Image (cartoon, rainbow, N blue to C red):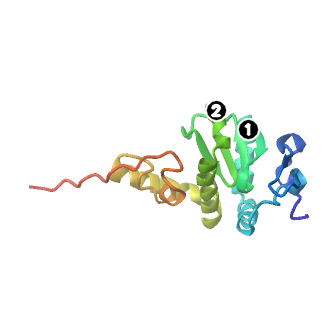
């Protein structure tokens, strides 16, 4: 498969990949999807395909009835996620960012998409789906330390707490025995 041809990767047609003009004036379509991507973003895309995290994200998006479109940095944006778990407005599975219907406007937020792209990189670094239990353990640690799932979650800290819309909570004081 040609490295610029990504339509086969997601089974997408032109309707999920609107043509846009790039800063260089070149027309971006599904066939030129990765033109503006860095080598690292292309590598992450392929790693997340191989480790099955992106195919799982696409399967979840399809099962949840989401509409799919190309996003920045090699991400795919699935809008209309209505399943009850997780409760977040946006979350990432591989290179797929799933957005709730009330959060569709977030697809245009470059800061949040940068945060989600860093999570996508974390999937690649954790060899795909092992990221999920590792993230869960980090969230539990954060909850125990701060009462918040994100503040001391190493994955959220590496992705940028503020960029993901999180506030940093202080660490709880340990109780001492008198």
Residue drawn at (71%, 68%), measured in percent from left and top? 40
Residue 53, picture quadrant = bottom right
Q: Pick whichever, 140 or 95, lies toward us.
A: 95
Specify the label residue 63 is tagged with. Answer: 1
Q: Secondary structure at mark 2?
A: loop
Image quadrant for the N terminus?
A: bottom right
From the image, state whether disc 2 or disc 1 is nearer to you: 2
Q: Pick whichever, 65 or 73, lies toward us.
A: 73
Q: Pick whichever, 21 or 164, lies toward us.
A: 21
Q: Residue 169 at x, y = what percent?
A: 36, 49
Specify the label residue 31 is tagged with. Answer: none
Residue 64, picture quadrant = top right
Q: Earlier in the sequence, mark 2 or mark 1?
A: 1
Instruction: Count all numbered tags in the image, as a single digit.
Output: 2
Residue drawn at (58%, 34%), measured in percent from left and top? 84
**Is 3 displayed left or right of 49 in the figure?**
right
Q: Residue 50 at x, y = what percent?
A: 75, 63
Please name the residue that numbered disc 2 is placed on. Answer: 82
Pointers 2 and 1 in contact (CB under 8 A)? no
Give the class, few, some or many, for how many residues have Cα within 10 Å of label 2's Cα (few <14, many ≥20): some
Residue drawn at (87%, 51%), measured in percent from left and top? 30
């Amino acid at each position: 498969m040609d490295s610029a041809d990504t339509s086969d990767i997601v089974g997408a047609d032109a309707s999920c990949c609107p043509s846009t003009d790039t800063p260089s004036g070149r027309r971006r379509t599904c066939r030129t999807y990765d033109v503006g991507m860095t080598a690292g973003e292309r590598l992450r895309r392929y790693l997340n395909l191989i480790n099955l995290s992106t195919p799982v994200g696409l399967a979840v998006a399809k099962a949840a009835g989401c509409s799919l479109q190309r996003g920045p940095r090699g991400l795919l944006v699935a809008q209309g996620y209505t399943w009850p778990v997780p409760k977040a407005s946006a979350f990432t599975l591989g290179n797929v960012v799933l957005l709730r219907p009330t959060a569709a406007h977030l697809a245009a937020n470059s800061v949040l998409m940068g945060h989600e792209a860093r999570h996508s990189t974390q999937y690649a670094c954790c060899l795909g789906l092992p990221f999920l239990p590792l993230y869960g353990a980090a969230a539990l640690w954060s909850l125990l330390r701060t009462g918040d799932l994100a503040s001391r979650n190493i994955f959220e800290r590496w992705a940028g707490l503020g960029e993901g819309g999180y506030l940093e909570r202080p660490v709880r004081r340990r109780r001492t025995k008198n």
